[in-house]
Image: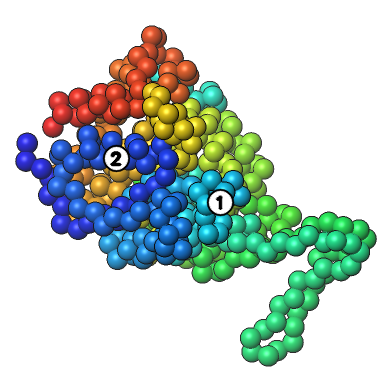
Amino acid sequence: MEKIQMTTPLVEMDGDEMTRILWQMIKDELLLPFIDLKTEYYDLGLEYRDKTNDQVTIDSAEATKKYGVAVKCATITANAARVKEYNLKEMWKSPNGTIRAILDGTVFRCPIVVKGIEPCVKSWKKPITLARHAYGDVYKNAEMQIPGPGEVKLVYTPADGSPEQTITVHQFEGSGVVQGQYNLDESIENFAKSCFEYALETKQDLWFATKDTVSKKYDHRFKDIFAEMYEKQYKEAFEKEGIEYFYTLIDDAVARIMKAEGGFIWACKNYDGDVMSDMVSSAFGSLAMMTSVLVSPHGYYEYEAAHGTVQRHYYKHLKGEETSTNSVATIFAWTGALRKRGEMDGIKDLMTFADKLEKAVIDTIEGGEMTKDLALITTIPNPKVLNSRDFILAVRGRLEKSL
């Protein structure tokens, strides 16, 4: 068949460890034979980030602003052990955190639902999409260990020279710890806009939850901005589409979620979204079966898998041992990016290809061929366990039949 032509490149962000191995397999077997793939390549592997003093991460985010669509492989976030293992110059920040700060986007994570991989929560029948605010809060905090008695204050010094505002955080009588967090009205507004727009685009109800009864200024600010934006800009459109915006406390949302059917978007602040997306993905079956897209209100999209670099499998791979690593979410990162590129450039063939590749993946699993992690939890009788490459090749076989 003639390869599908692209007009505008995708920004391609390569990554680390086992997902980097899968990344190349996916390109070689599922993309390059069928698409005249155009990408602007950035190597976000930890060694190259260290070599460039992390400038490559910044450059990849700026390129996403230029081209509008990016696809990212999972990457290592350095800790003390990684600094020693890779002999790093310093403990570089999370590349995801850097990219999110530059694009100021909202992360939408949604489980990939297939027959035979049943949710642990029996009431869940449809995917629950987590919308995570990807700016500020504990991820941009300032912390201090308090050695002994003393007073800790929050001080605001206005730039215009007007009087300072001061409140006491705590009067310490002994040692302890203290933490300061912040957020910006502009970022919260962008978060709200991304959530409302995504709900309209996908025609799903939108839930939002904070703890405003306890955090009467910080969390309440989130609640107020969402409410004001909904009333002024989105209420009429939501009613026209027959979808609902619903606010509740985070603890009430958790209780309701456990008895809900699904099929809606759950918007959370940064930390809540980080934790709850892992809970939802695990309860639906596997973190390797969850898509993740960073949506910026400025019109930028960055697609990736919700999971990490699969370090344990990578070490087995280095020893020449066989691995059975689930590549589904990484494949869906590519299909999401290709579909959005096709949509933005008016290339229907590219959008159709993305749909067919996703269907080939799902049909492969529902046909009883899957990686070991899924075979351990499936209700499909006598599943065939495939290694990392053979699963991708099985998907290719089904894809070729559909083209």
Residue 102 drawn above or below residue 158: above
- Give, as a three-letter code, the residue at label 1: Val
Residue 371 in picture, x, y percent from top left: 39, 23
Instruction: Name the foreground residue: 352 vs 59.
Output: 59
Residue 324 visible here: no
Residue under label 1, please give it: 83
Decide if residue 219 is on the left or right side of residue 117.
Answer: right
Residue 10 drawn above or below residue 66: above
Most distant residue in the left direction: 2
Instruction: Name the foreground residue: 109 vs 259.
Output: 109
Residue under label 2, please give it: 24
Q: CA distance from mark 1 to mark 2?
A: 26 Å
Q: Residues within 10 Å of mark 2 (few under 14, many from 20)?
A: few
Question: Closer to the observer: label 1 or label 2?
Answer: 1
Residue 306: name its quadrant.
Answer: top left
User: Is the C-beta separation of discs 1 and 2 under 8 Å?
Assistant: no
Decide if residue 221 is on the left or right side of residue 100.
Answer: right
Decide if residue 347 is on the left or right side of residue 87.
Answer: left
Instruction: Name the foreground residue: 267 vs 170.
Output: 170
Residue under the image location 30 percent in, 27 percent down = 389
Q: Helix or strand or loop: what does disc 2 sit on?
A: helix
- Give, as a three-letter code, the residue at label 2: Gln
Q: Residues within 10 Å of mark 1 (few under 14, many from 20)?
A: some
Instruction: Work out which quarter of the rendered image holds the N terminus and state it.
Output: top left
Residue 58 in picture, x, y percent from top left: 41, 64
Residue 11 in picture, x, y percent from top left: 30, 56
Disc with the residue nearer the chain's start (1 vs 2): 2
Residue under the image location 38 percent in, 23 percent down = 322
Residue under the image location 81 percent in, 65 percent down = 169
